[in-house]
Amino acid sequence: MNDHTFDEQTARGWIRGIEQGNSQVREQDIYPRLRAWLERAAPTRILEIGCGQGVCSAKIDLSGRIYIGVDPSPFLIDRARELYTTAGREFAVGNAYELPFSEKQFDAVFSVMVWHLLSDLPKAAFEMCRVLKPGGHFLIVTANPGARSDWEAIYLNQKIDGRRFEGDLVLDGKIFDHDVLYFHTQLEIESALNRAGLQVDTVEPFRKSKPDQAQEYLISMQGTRPASTDSSL
Ligand SMILES: C[S@@+](CC[C@H](N)C(=O)[O-])C[C@H]1O[C@@H](n2cnc3c(N)ncnc32)[C@H](O)[C@@H]1O
């Protein structure tokens, strides 16, 4: 696996960005989508894959619910535990490729701004399906594969190798971070989910960074693990 999981420096940058910034895309688009999806899914046990410093758990109504957030960065998990301490919330170190749970544990699983960091989508999709209960719901918010050129435009010092894209993210004229992204096509994402036994119900591109931009730069995919699926294939 050649994934660039967040090291301490990247994690610090992410914490600073989230905790100091007032992200309009998050407040206006991502969190409302997450809340609307949760309302429809009405889950009791929720898993967030790649929870970062845990901010999404603070943007949803967790009353009467159990939320678990996992992330491979111990640094981010420590920060999440420090910040979000109310009952019903837990954070654990864990990777999308090897979730630290037995099967059929969750009514709903979501992942925000993580799937474009994953090289092996079939493996991540299989794991997501494995831990979902039959009839359970998933939501993925990730980079819109159709807006690859808009994503590439915000990076300097690019290295491109097929689906793999590496570069320095420039924000407000300064290098903010070094990222490795994977531009899987929408078809590849959907087939990874389908092959894992998940059903994709809705695919919705959203959010333009400029009104005249041709493509929305994010995409949400929602669906279910059909009641009859057995992921131990
Ligand atoms: C852009 S941040 C998003 C964090 C959080 N989902 C949010 O929206 O606030 C991407 C997160 O994906 C995590 N990540 C990277 N590779 C991962 C993997 N293989 N499994 C799970 N999470 C991963 C990173 O550690 C980081 O916390």
Image (spheres, rainbow, N blue to C red):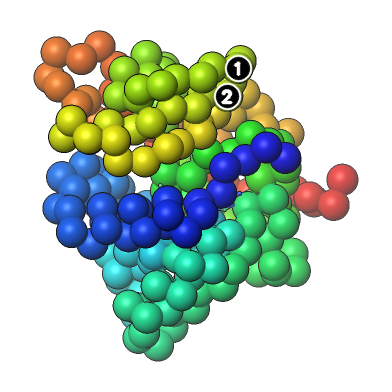
Query: Quick one: label 1, few (<14), some, or many (20+) residues within 10 Å?
Result: few
Numbered mark located on residue 161 in the image: 1
Q: Nearer the viewer, residue 159 or 150?
A: 159
The residue under the point 31% across, 18% down is 153
Helix, strand, or loop for circle 2? strand
Q: Quadrant of the N terminus?
A: top right
Helix, strand, or loop for circle 1? strand
The residue under the point 51% across, 19% down is 159
Numbered mark located on residue 121 in the image: none
Query: Quick one: label 2, few (<14), some, or many (20+) residues within 10 Å?
Result: some
**Residue found at the very far right of the displayed protein:** 233
The CA distance from mark 1 to mark 2 is: 5 Å
Vertical arrangement, residue 122 with respect to residue 228, above or below: above
Vertical arrangement, residue 119 with respect to residue 77, above or below: above
- The residue that label 2 is drawn on is 164
Looking at the rendered structure, the kind of residue marked 2 is: Arg
Q: Is residue 193 visible?
A: no
The residue under the point 47% across, 59% down is 8
Residue 9, image x and y in percent?
42, 54
Residue 232, image x and y in percent?
85, 52
Looking at the rendered structure, the kind of residue marked 1 is: Asp
Vertical arrangement, residue 4 with respect to residue 158, above or below: below
